[in-house]
Image (spheres, rainbow, N blue to C red):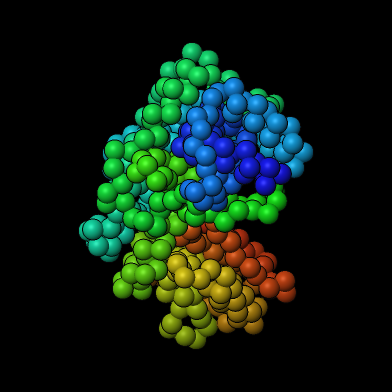
Amino acid sequence: MVEKNSTWMKQFNPEHIFLWIQVSAIHPANRRFQKRFEILLEVMFSIKNSEFEYNHLSREEYENFLTTFDLQSKVIFSQLEDWQPFEQSKLIPYFYNQKKYYFFYGDLERPYELLNRLGTLINLTHKDLLAKTSPVEFLFIKSLEFQTRLLAKLKSEPVWVENQPNMHVPSQAFFDSFSREFYLDSLESVPESIILDQGTCRQARRLEPVTSILEHWVYARFTSGNGFYLLPQIHCQALYNLFNGLIIRSEKLGEIEQFLFEEAMDYIRFRTTEVCSLNKSLLGILGQGEKKLLTNQNDSSYLLDENKVLIVKVVPPKFKEDISQEIIGEIQQFNEFQERRNWGEVRGIIAQDSEVITVSPKRLEFYCVVVFRPTTYAFGYTLPLDLPLDNIWILDVTDWERLIEHSDSSKV
């Protein structure tokens, strides 16, 4: 099927094909079909310039093609598209530097959190730790402005019908109105790494619902010299990739990771203490017959009631590798601490006023939350199957914050 689609595309001007696919992909009726439109763009960008005949593409010809493609690919993508998207018409505001924007949700499960996390990372590192010539913040804002403008125009459309059962071909009037929104005045000052040129994609051997390779680019460029925005639904992933690449290549990588670690610790302590209240915040857990704390100096401890103690551990962020080993290390520390408690080595807990509260170790119950701040849009970790996880929870910063915000502070 890929070869058949490629053969059809070669008859026409690639810019015409590109714009029809792009305009179709942002149409509200096509919300759930984003991945199929991405694949069509990948097929088109895998064709060399010399292979196109550059004929004009009419709406009728495009409609015949898309209708056939929809019928032939529906079964392949049926499982992937069997979901209920959050309605794009319900615009969620996003604020960056006190300015309000709107954004495309795409096929992301938690789009606001993803965007907010990227904005936080850019805002924290851009001012002092990344070179002032770094384009990330500039491109981030430009993308938000583009998405806000496009969504405002879509919102003004008289009919907004989402989640149709079949791929929809926009009217000629809709195409004429929205195709011009993708044009760029200039690609100057835009890094080459996020510009997709004609003929540079590798062509897939078969049509299948795999991860899109378009998520590495924000812009497209043709031999005519014209530059365009790529699908707004994939901008967040592409800017994450650009941001991470700049951090990894930066001479200040270690400094940036340490800065983000310290900032995360301060933020998590502040938000947790707000909910748990200061009189529940502890300086640490004291060992039997020792003056030093059994808990790590980077840990935060909270007395939940007379015999329950919560220990919050923050994992240092990593850009070059995943954080599995750091998470495992924090879990092992807590498990070792639990063993010392079982052997009666816990003397008591130290309150904020340095008062030592002596308690029976057998009466104390300890709980641990390992918190991490993701530095990529697709993150994960791997734990050994035999690693004990009793009384341990692993959460990213956003989930931890949501959990404590919705908890009864008197019972946290």
Q: Quadrant of residue 341?
A: bottom right
Closer-to-camera residue (266/51) = 51
Rendered view: 96 above or below 310: above
Question: How many numbered marks does the figure carry?
Answer: 0
Q: Residue at x 32, y 41 (%)?
A: 142
Q: Residue at x 74, y 36 (%)?
A: 72
Q: Position of 87 compared to 270: left or right? A: right
Q: Is residue 25 visible?
A: yes
Residue 235 image position (x, y, % from top left): 45, 45
- Which of 194/176 is in front? 176
Q: Residue at x 43, y 82 (%)?
A: 292
Q: Residue furthest bottom?
A: 289
Residue depicted at x 56% and y 74% = 325
Residue 392: give x, y in percent of width and height.
Answer: 62, 64
Q: Residue 250, image x and y in percent?
A: 33, 69
Depth check: 26 or 121 in front?
26
Q: Judge by depth and name the residue closer to the eye, 217 or 155.
A: 217
Q: Quadrant of residue 256?
A: bottom left
Residue 322 point in image, percent of width and height: 53, 68
Extreme left residue here? 132
**Residue 5, above or below 84:** below
Q: Tell me if residue 269 can be seen.
A: no
In the image, farthest residue toward the top = 158
Please identify the quadrant where the N terminus is shown.
top right
